[in-house]
Image (cartoon, helix red, strand yellow):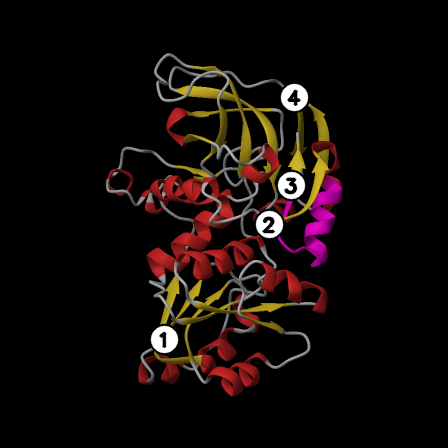
Amino acid sequence: MKAVIINNFGDIDVLEYKEIEEPKIGPNEVLVQIKAVALNHLDIWIRKGINIRPKLPHILGADISGIVVDKGSEVKHIDIGDEVVLAPAISCNLCYECISGNDNFCKSYSILGENVWGGYREYINIRGEFVFKKPNNLNFIESASFLLTSLTAYNALIRRGNLQRDEIILIMSGGSGVGSVAIQIAKKILNAYVITTVGSDEKIEKAYEIGADYVINWKKSDIVEEIKNKFGRIDMVLDHTGKMHINNLIKIVKNGGRIVTYGATSGHIAEIDLRHIFFRQISIIGSTMGRRSDLIKIIDYYEKGILKPVIYKVLPLEDAKQAHKILESGEVFGKVVLEV
């Protein structure tokens, strides 16, 4: 089968399109012919060897849709020929955290394409419990585009941030994969008032189209001044930028407000004034991925049309280098997807 692999960490030239052996399945696994796999910034960090350095050779890609072409004898809920999506992470399914529903706390929790091989290939073998039927109304490209980002946004907003109806939230980087679905969840499911930031004027209208109530070009406007002048202080912030903005975000949340962080794109070592945190009773909350059970709800939201995929560019698998280049450019609004 064809696959894109990395044998070294570095720039886009380490991505090699080549022939490798097709995987075999065990009795509790299915074999999926991959039809589409979406990119995440995680792919770029792993490719570069930033913080995460899996054993090489390695295959990237967490967000996968495809067709079941074979299954083991113990798999009962999925049939050959089913059009499916895969949970973007796997866990042991045996420990206390998994059994209690908090599988994203499992010690062996692994995002596909992070420490286990992912979906930049034609076929993948995976345990049956991580396979779900895709939304009937979406094609394979659309179905691959929402998995990791929607699970991350849902967990951050609902499970961890406890966002409430009519609260005011700032979602940083509304054009990012997580940002573009977080806007929809906050607006269409929770009916919050959504402020978001973008990095260019071209992205402003796109953010309004998917549900944002107020959009700020952070490269042209002071986020703190604009929000304080327009809204005063706000209830909640969803952020993945990290070091660059954290101190400004602390200034714009109200007493008792919260900042939910799910990444640190600009750097993970930040110095903050703790007096703001304890005196104003601000909560800084961490969030990573989400419960596999929540993926069932998310698939249903897409099937009902409540949430909609936001796709920026589709390229063939062999153009993975170009896809990485586009994602790194900062021009993207939504997802970049590889068609297999």
Of labels 3 and 2, earlier in sequence is 2
Quarter of the image for residue 37 reads top right
Residue 325 lies in the magenta stretch: yes
Q: Residue at x 41, y 53 (%)?
A: 154
In the rendering, at what x and y percent does residue 336 appear?
65, 45
In this view, 312 is above or below 236: above
Q: Find numbered disc 3 in the image and state the secondary structure of the residue it sits on.
A: strand
* Closer to viewer: mark 4 or mark 1: 1
**Separation of residues labelled 4 and 1 (CA atoms):** 51 Å
**Separation of residues labelled 1 and 3 (CA atoms):** 36 Å
Q: Residue at x 51, y 79 (%)?
A: 248
Of labels 1 and 2, earlier in sequence is 1
Quarter of the image for residue 145 reads top right
**What residue does disc 4 label?**
20
In the rendering, at what x and y percent does residue 283 appear?
35, 72
In the rendering, at what x and y percent does residue 43 appear?
60, 45
Of labels 4 and 1, earlier in sequence is 4
Q: Is residue 7 visible?
A: no
Q: Quadrant of the N terminus?
A: top right
**Separation of residues labelled 1 and 2 (CA atoms):** 29 Å
**What residue does disc 2 label?**
310
**What residue does disc 1 label?**
257
Magenta range: 321-337
**What residue does disc 3 label?**
337
Q: Is there a contact, CB below 8 Å, between mark 2 and mark 4?
A: no
Q: Amino acid at mark 4?
A: Ile
